[in-house]
Amino acid sequence: MRKQIDDLSVRDAQTGCFNRRYLEETLPRELKIAQRTGRQLAVILMDIDHFGQFTEVFGHGASGMVLRDLGSFLRENIREVDVPCRYGADEFALLFPDTSLATCRRRAEHLHAMIRDLSLQDGHAHMRRITISMGIAACPDQGETMCDLMEAVKTALKNAKQTGRDRISVAEG
């Protein structure tokens, strides 16, 4: 019972991913580990493009299915040591321990392509109507504190959205 209560306090009920609170507790700890061991830590911040408009057109039921399916997809397609989090209403953050910026970019490209493919599969018709923008950053390349790293990844995501959406942008060092 205690485990269930603890799990509920750190998980987003709709997506099954960890919640923002968990991210804010975990990221500083992972940064300290990365710095102590000399390893890298990468972050992807992703946003569902025009999700507000999607919800207006297709309703809350369809938008709920998209969030649920995207959360499930992320949990199933990352390593067990990676941390998928729902960061905002339509934003997800992924923490990748022991991952360089270059490797994170390849993983982001792979996830981006898989999300497009997912939208073509039966049973995921509602996913056909969404695209994803992603920003990526890594420690120590873009910062060694939670604030610096999150600011860098948010700026990269903003750049992806401003340059046309449905793309990946790498934070500048």
Image (tube, helix red, strand yellow):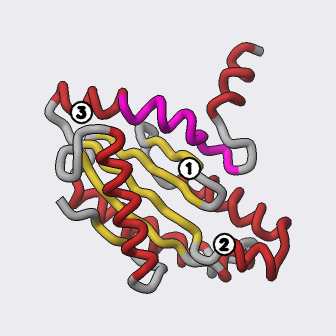
Q: What range of the chain is rendered magenta? A: 15-28
Q: Residue at x 61, y 44 (%)?
A: 17
Relative to 80, 30 lies left or right: left
Q: Which residue is mark 3?
A: 34
* Identity, as a three-letter code, of the amino acid under mark 2: Phe
- Locate residue 156 relative to residue 127 in the image: left or right: left
Screen quadrant of the C terminus: bottom left
Based on the picture, tell me whether residue 18 belongs to the magenta stretch. Answer: yes
Q: Nearer the viewer, mark 1 or mark 3?
A: 1
Farthest top residue? 2
Above or below — where is 40 with respect to 66? above
Whether label 2 touches label 1, CB < 8 Å: no
Query: Is the residue marked by circle 2 packed among few (<14), some (14-19), or many (20+) residues within 10 Å?
Result: some
Residue 50 placed where, x, y %?
Answer: 62, 77
Identify which amino acid the numbered label 1 is placed on. Tyr
- Which circle, 2 or 3, is nearer the viewer? 2
Residue at screen point 54% across, 77% down: 116
Label 3, residues with CA under 10 Å away: few <14, some 14-19, many ≥20? some
Name the residue located 42 percent from the left edge and 69 percent from the top edge.
158
Give the mark nearest the N terminus, 1 or 3: 3
Number of the label disc, if any, that sits on residue 95? none
Disc 3 is placed on an element classified as helix
Circles 1 and 3 in contact, beta carbons < 8 Å = no
- Judge from the rendering whether residue 12 lies leftward or rightward of residue 91; answer left or right: right
Q: Which residue is mark 1?
A: 87
* Kind of residue at badge 3: Ala
Q: Give the CA separation, mark 2 to mark 3.
A: 34 Å
- Residue 27: quadrant of the picture: top left
- Classify mark 1: residues with Cα within 10 Å, few (<14), some (14-19) or many (20+): many
Report the disc number at residue 51.
Answer: 2
Where is residue 84 drawn, in percent x and y?
A: 51, 46
